Amino acid sequence: MGIPCGEAKRYTGRVQKTKRAAAGVGRGRHTLIGMSHDDAEPTVTSAGPSAVTAEEEVARICAELIRIDSSNYGDGSGPGERKAAEYVMGELAEVGLEGTLLESEPGRATVVVRLEGEDSSRPGLAVHGHLDVVPANAADWQVDPFAAEERDGCIWGRGAVDMKDMDAMILANIRHFARSGTRPARDTTFVFFADEEAGGTYGSHWLVDHQPQWFEGVTEAISEVGGYSVSVPTSQGPQRAYLLQTAEKGIAWLRLRAHGRAGHGSVPNDDNAIVRLAAAIGRIAAHEWPREYIASVRELLDTLSTMTGLSSADEDLEQLLATLGGAQGFVRGTLRDTANVTMLESGYKHNVIPQTATAAVDCRFLPGHEDALMATIRELAGEHVEVEVVHRDVAIEAPFSGDLVESMKQALLREDPEAAVLPYCLSGGTDNKALSRLGISGYGFAPLRLPADLDFAPMFHGIDERVPVDSLCFGARVLGDFLRTC
Ligand SMILES: [Zn+2]
């Protein structure tokens, strides 16, 4: 199809207002939870020409979301998601939809909206994004991370990649459904979560624990960190391949606590807690975790091998991984379990041997490996070092087959017929972990056709995060197509 996206590039507020007026879209009539809504003008609910498409709005919405700082520091000190959630509520109300804004704690806000599908007898789908972002140190960036500047055809800012881009694609499509009176194929629960960047305690896990009814009938979900393209070198030249995320490693954030004998810094001490901790850390760092290929990783490597003509044997793997460019880091993290020491704390005076010493270890395990990883860490830690679990979450794996996967593939291929679609496992985690507790199979499908020279994957939590406007338009089209056909 390839609708030219030139129009959508004019996403500034002024231009868009003119468009809205032309489209006859007024303020919504619904009362918003916790929001004053006194600019009541004559309203249009679901009417308005269907001419305003998702791709015409997606860049504006992405930029406006980036300008709302929703940094999540993980300790409750950030601004929270409330402003971003109110923005989403406003965008929904404007097209006559009543979203529900839920707060787990003051300021920690999630928005849910359900749309009835063409065939409500089919199992429901969840489509979710998160409204929070990781913090940004402005001094490290070429641009103000919360200004959503447009440069070189890209929107720059914290969240442009993770994941206000996909939030905008979702919201733009919901708005188009409402205005055009069309429906998604299946009953669909759309969620904009709080707190994904700190494990979802105040977002996805909270919603699953306290209001699981939102997911009644839902069997499958799509969200972030998958569906983006990489350029793979083949004998026929570079070929575009979309990485569809079908699995996520599990998380075990551990605290090691070494115990020893306190004493004077001048007196020999064979029971020094710091020495015991250092030895434990040294053993964990030196441990070679066995390599194991889960189904999605095996299929990814085998398909890459076929595409490139390179061997997928263990000893040749580095060469094969290199064909993925910046995305290779995500894949390298999924070849085995991992354990990285990330924080260290002990002592309070130069001449005092402390009684305890602690370290934080970030462990990520493959599906089915949690018990074995914990046993290995306990053994490596040794007898004087306790291992405490600070936070854990499951590993998940869904098949790279079936109707939903086929719908994702076909939606991509209708826009980009020559491309390949490959499965992959994410070394990190998403809100799909929380939904898996309700038996929902989660995939990463935030479709973006990216320029071959854009090093996309390292921008997740990186600096100078940016997304091409053309890629957003592509994503809005593919997502809309998918939602109508899945
Ligand atoms: Zn994310």
Image (cartoon, rainbow, N blue to C red):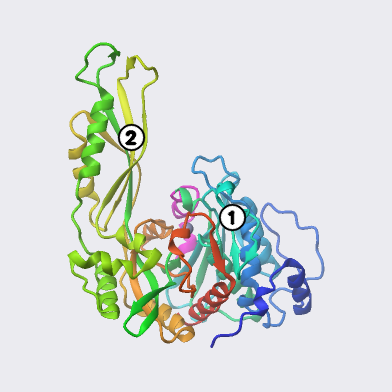
User: Element type at marker 1?
Assistant: loop
The reply to whether residue 65 is in sight is: yes
Residue 441 visible in the current orientation: no
Q: Amino acid at mark 1?
A: Gln
**Relative to 83, residue 221 above or below:** below
- What's the residue type where badge 2 is placed? Ala
Packing grade of label 2 (10 A; few <14, some 14-19, many >=20) is many
Please rate how many residues cluster around mark 1, counting C-alpha atoms within 10 Å: few if below 14, some from 14 to 19, many from 20: few
- Over which residues does the magenta segment extend? 199-218
Q: Tell me: 192 left or right of 291.
A: right
Screen quadrant of the C terminus: bottom left
Q: Name which quarter of the figure residue 389 lies in.
A: top left
Considering depth in this image, is 11 or 368 the residue closer to the camera? 11
* Mark 2, secondary structure of its residue: strand
Mark 1 lies on residue: 142
How many numbered discs?
A: 2
Does the segment drawn in magenta span residue 123? no
User: Picture coordinates of residue 290 (x, y %)?
Assistant: 18, 55
- Residue designated by label 2: 359
- Image: 189 above or below 147: below
Left or right: where 29 falls relative to 135 = right
Residue in the image at 75% along x and 76% along y = 19
On the image, the x and y values in percent for residue 391 come to 36, 44
Give the image location of residue 186, x and y in percent.
Answer: 48, 77
Measured in 3D between alpha carbons, the distance from the residue under mark 2 to the one under mark 1, in whole angstroms, is 34 Å
Rendered residue at 31%/83% (across/down): 235
